[in-house]
Amino acid sequence: MIIVNKKILPLFISIIMIAVCFIPADIFASTKTVTSQKEVSFSLKVRSYNSVKLTWKKRAGKDAEYSIYRARSGKKFVRIAKVNGEKGSFTDKKLRTDKTYKYKIVSLRTEIVEVPDEDAEEISAENDVSEADAGDRNSDTITVKTYAYSEVKKVTPIIAKPRSFRASRCGSSTSVRLRWKKSKDAAVYKIYRSSKKTKGYSLIEKLPASARTYKDRDSKSKPVYYYKIKAVRKVNGKEHSSKKVRAKVYVKYKISGKSDYTASRLAAYFKANGKKYPSYYRKHSSAKTIKEFAKIYVKECRAENIKPEVAFAQCMLETGWLTFGGDVSITQYNFAGLGATGGGVPGNSFSTIRKGIRAHIQHLKAYASKAPLNKKCVDPRFSYVTRGTCRYVEWLGIYENPHNAGWAATPGYGANLVEMIKDI
């Protein structure tokens, strides 16, 4: 037994404590920290106006855990959550709308590695554990902590915009129907309208969050309108909005202008309606198929800057799909009823399909434009038209024409043509 004088006991204890400080740490503990070469890959997605979701691929092993760090612009990162290894996502809530946040993830995986004395050196090499740790004769296991780090990503929670916003004409009227799919964040929707694509928008309606459709009854003065819609919500007394979504609609269908309608498309429309191309044309003309017939319409229309879908649809309406059941006969090559005023008057006749189609296009141009013809005039009634009084298909009907002019006296004549064009 060692007997220590009470007077020197404090000095003895101090010497012992100093000596302990110089003893290697691995005598008391067998833990090794390893930084992984692999990063944690994650994605960020806005879930709502005040929440975002982080998603990552889980690491192997249920003993892993993830620390989620967040920072505002110019601020330090703070750990906001610790997620166990069985999960691969985390939703951060109660964020501020329109504020940018930065995120990063640190993954920790803890493993207990058995280290038999005779295999200590080999296991240390496999697990990046020092020989001092592995060779600790006071323990037969080593705790290995492996950390992996993600890159920093940033995101801004915003109001979700309405989806699938579209505008369409309401039947034969000039009203416009707007439709959209809901925004999960909307408290109200605000709708704007302009006759120009990039400017001049004015607020026309404010609708509740339950609304999915709106009918604009006042869009009658311009041939085309642009609409924008945005979802709006008040957060902490401040109004926040989604990005605006735009839609376009032709309220009135212009007769003149460029068009991407092809002969194949026009011919397909004819066939889709179950019609048969007249055998007379197969035997007595150069256009022996409906596609060849449509090609002539497209070529003649482009020569005079007339939309081929307008002229072709009118041809089908005037001739009863080339059946000629009225005063005009199939042998006249008169595809628009030119000069057929009723009461058995047969109207004008033309020598070929091409001349008959050209006369039709020129007569349309007389109504739709004041520009001169690009080809020699073959329309005997061209000079009878007050030029430029029917710029839109809807105005081809006299009852709907603001100039009290027009192609036909049948009510809704132009609207019927528009419906046909929409089906092409």
Image (spheres, helix red, strand yellow):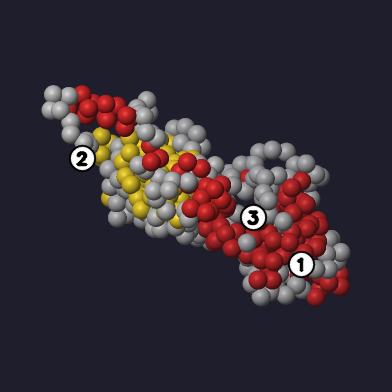
- Which residue lies at the image location 38% right of the left edge and 41% below the top edge? 27
**For the residue marked with disc 1, what is the amino acid?**
Ile
| Residue located 57% across and 59% down the image | 422
Using the image, determine if residue 114 lies above or below residue 226: below
Q: Nearer the viewer, mark 1 or mark 2?
A: 2
Q: Amino acid at mark 2?
A: Met
Q: Name the quadrant of the C terminus.
A: bottom right
Q: Nearer the viewer, residue 247 or 204?
A: 247
Badge 2, how many Cα within 10 Å: few under 14, some, many 20+? few
**Residue 1: mark in rendering:** 2
The reply to whether the C-beta atoms of the residues labelled 1 and 2 are less than 8 Å apart is no
Q: Secondary structure at mark 2?
A: loop
> What residue is at 44 percent from the left and 32 percent from the top?
200
Give me the C-alpha separation between circle 1 and circle 2: 121 Å
Name the mark nearer the viewer: 2 or 3: 2
The residue singled out by tag 1 in the image is: 290
In this picture, residue 311 sits left or right of residue 212: right
User: At which x and y percent is residue 405?
Assistant: 55, 48
Residue 299 seen by the camera: yes
The amino acid type found where label 3 is placed reads: Val
Q: Earlier in the sequence, mark 2 or mark 3?
A: 2
- 197 in relation to 351, above or below: above
Residue 190 in view (yes/no): no
Q: Does residue 135 appear to the left or right of 184 in the view shown?
A: right
Residue 267 rendering spot, x and y as whole percentages: 72, 65
